[in-house]
Image (cartoon, helix red, strand yellow):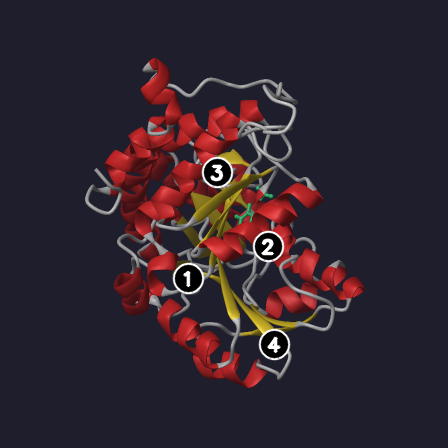
Amino acid sequence: MSSREERLETTLIHASTRGDFEQKTGVVNVPIYLSSTFHQESFDDFGPYDYSRSGNPTRDALEKSIAALEGGARGLAFASGIAAISSAFMLLSSGDHIVITEDVYGGTYRFVTQVLTKFGITHTFADFTNAKDVAIAIQPNTKLLYIETPANPLLGITDIEQIVELAKANDCLTFLDNTFMTPLYQRPLDLGVDVVLHSATKFLSGHSDIIAGLAVTKDEELGNRLAFIQNSFGAILGAQDSYTLIQGIKTMGARLVQSTEAAQKITSYLDSHPLVEEVFYPGLASHPGHAIHAKQSTSPGAVLSFRLPNRETAKAFVESVQIPVFAVSLGGVESILSHPAQMSHAAMPKAEREKRGITDGLLRFSVGLEHVDDLIADFDQALAIANKNLIANN
Ligand SMILES: *Cc1c(COP(=O)(O)O)cnc(C)c1O
């Protein structure tokens, strides 16, 4: 059965063993091929593998899985999400210009502003929730529109088809960071995007145990060019981590569905709490991108953000919650609370950050697999303490 006919929940389980492995041995788990090099049977004809930077059977199984899940021609696995993202940027050349979402992940911001500029690749930030703002930023040498939707950490929504249309009219590529949605909830290549990027460190692996990145190209030609960069730059994912990621992907369907259901309950709780100034979640009808998100994705996902009045209230809240871990990252089985101003967006200057709504009272919450009632009860007692703290300081 092709991946087109079956539902993604099924592909998640079986994609990794649908290659040679299954036919040869019947394994239900892909073996971890710990071999840097491969013996060649003949002097002139080399086999499918020669050296593990260029190709490894375990990584291959993962790369084929993510390509099937995203509906792309070629999948590639990297040592981190940022390795996948920076390698994809290497498809560009000196003199090229990028239009990139101003809500971009902090590490991508750092790479574009501090590394790419050294190689003569320039950029303009634009508000991707407004296609007109993107259109204005396009220059004659613009070669790429870079999308992140929902974006980090305010869950801003970009209309994918509108940006793709704009890119096609201007001869630009489109890249999309699909980390928050995963292919289960959003398939950007189906909407015309050229390259989908993932921090597989997050929901795809799901257990906060590995750092990994994935890229999927819509067509074969771009896939071959990116595979060339993967081999030349060398930021590949190792066989052991490839295996761990394959296993994580198998349970992602069940994990995401449960976490998303809980996220919806937590958002309504937060939305009605008097201390919470604003809740950012594409599932809320009041979210400015709600309708667009519903058009291009099948679920609002398991990440939300909320604004407390100031740094002190946020600090009191974080110091009072007992269940979530307070950490960088998202998408784990454990709920993860983070403080974007000091974590994911620490690389962004304070003025720039605040202009984008990332204030000191903003907290991001990635919902894990704990019982939702326990999470809400924990939030409730912590918000009560934060509230007392606010009253005491006023
Ligand atoms: C974490 C993250 C990245 C970076 O991925 P790493 O695996 O940490 O290198 C990129 N984009 C988004 C949206 C992320 O959340």
The N terminus lies in quadrant: top left
Q: Residue furthest right?
A: 118
Q: Which amino acid type corresponds to the residue marked 1 in the rendered image?
A: Glu
- Residue 278 - label: 1
Q: Which residue is mark 3?
A: 336
Above or below for 37 versus 110: above
Q: Which amino acid type corresponds to the residue marked 2 in the rendered image?
A: Ala
Of the two numbered discs 4 and 2 on the same chain, state the one appearing first in sequence. Answer: 2
Q: Residue at x 73, y 73 (%)?
A: 95
Q: Residue 52 lies in what quarter of the image?
A: top right
Q: Which amino acid type corresponds to the residue marked 3 in the rendered image?
A: Ile
Q: CA distance from mark 2 to mark 3?
A: 28 Å
Q: CA distance from mark 3 to mark 1?
A: 19 Å
Under circle 2, the secondary element is helix
Q: Residue 144: x and y, percent?
A: 56, 69
Of the two numbered discs 2 and 1 on the same chain, state the one appearing first in sequence. Answer: 2
Q: Which residue is mark 2?
A: 88
Q: Which residue is mark 4?
A: 142
Of the two numbered discs 4 and 1 on the same chain, state the one appearing first in sequence. Answer: 4
Q: Looking at this view, is 191 or 356 the one in front?
A: 191
Q: Which amino acid type corresponds to the residue marked 4 in the rendered image?
A: Thr
